[in-house]
Amino acid sequence: MFLDALIAIFFFLVGLEIKNGIKDFKTAVVPIVAALGGMIVPASIYLLLNPGSHMWAASMPTDIALALGVLILLGKRVNPHVRLFLLTLAIADDLFSLIVLAIFYGDDLEPIKALTTLGAAAIGFILPLSTHALHKIIRVLTPVSTYFIVPVIVVVNIPLDINLSAFTSQTTISIILARSIGKIIGITLFAWLALRIGGHAKIGMKEITGVATLAGMGLTVALVIADIAARSEAELDQVRLGLFVSAIISGLAGFIWLRRTPAPL
């Protein structure tokens, strides 16, 4: 219950930040379209490497808390608009993942918990607030989220019971490649297409590539999907290991990439 409350506060703040940062549809369309690419391409790569597998959906979700944890470590080295792009992309990703869960895993889905997180973000986004009140709430909640809520969520979602013997399995390797490579290809390609058709972004393609790299980190929703879809404990171990390894690879690569992409003065 306590963790659920922290997650709700976290997503409420995410909704407020998106409300504060996105002023028009053209700004929102690029990360939303990019989120679709970040789901379609990884799932396609997974199925190409592991045809017929029902675990493909675990290759799609992005973990907001993990990715934000990396941005927190980078601090002022990163363009502040990177955070907004990431938040918008990840919220869209979570929404699309919920739709995928409902369609393909509906019999086993527990929608209340998923809807609670997205509902908290929606409340933050649509809540009628003056600019002064909006900024004040964000100023109050941001340090709480940064130094308490995000670390708690990250620690809780690190899997401790990983079977390293699953490392060479086809499922594990497919998850690692689909997330570590597929996220970068899908998000950057679809973001580029969205920009070409009239979308607008306050960050460049190099920074979008950094966001795409961080998006390869996925434990929370991906682990939920794995728990639902796995047909054996061995298969679940394989997916867990793949998610854990890809999160490490993506987190380190994204940190290095964005650290070498200095924020504008």
Image (cartoon, rainbow, N blue to C red):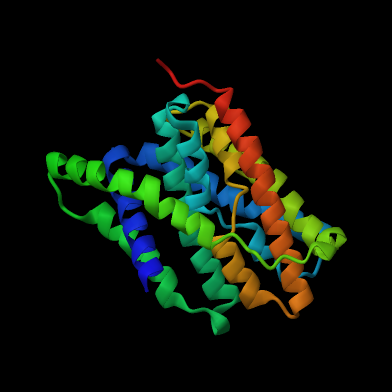
Horizontal side of 124 relative to 249 (left or right) equals: left
| Residue ID at (55%, 23%) | 261
| Residue ID at (51%, 20%) | 262
| Closer to us: 29 or 263 | 263
Is residue 43 visible to us here?
no
Horizontal side of 232 relative to 65 (left or right) equals: right
Q: Position of residue 118 (x, y in %)?
A: 38, 62
The vertical placement of 163 against 82, above or below, is: below
Q: Position of residue 6 (x, y in %)?
A: 36, 62
| Residue ID at (56%, 74%) | 103
Residue that extends furthest to the right in the rendered view of this protein: 168
Q: Quadrant of residue 61?
A: bottom right
Horizontal side of 136 relative to 244 (left or right) equals: left
How many marks can you see? 0
The vertical placement of 181 against 210, above or below, is: below
Is residue 184 visible to us here?
yes
| Residue ID at (68%, 52%) | 42
| Closer to us: 34 or 172 | 172
Q: Position of residue 222 (x, y in %)?
A: 60, 63
| Closer to us: 210 or 160 | 160
Q: Quadrant of the N terminus?
A: bottom left
Q: Position of residue 207 (x, y in %)?
A: 53, 29
Residue that extends furthest to the bottom in the rendered view of this protein: 107
Q: Quadrant of the C terminus?
A: top left
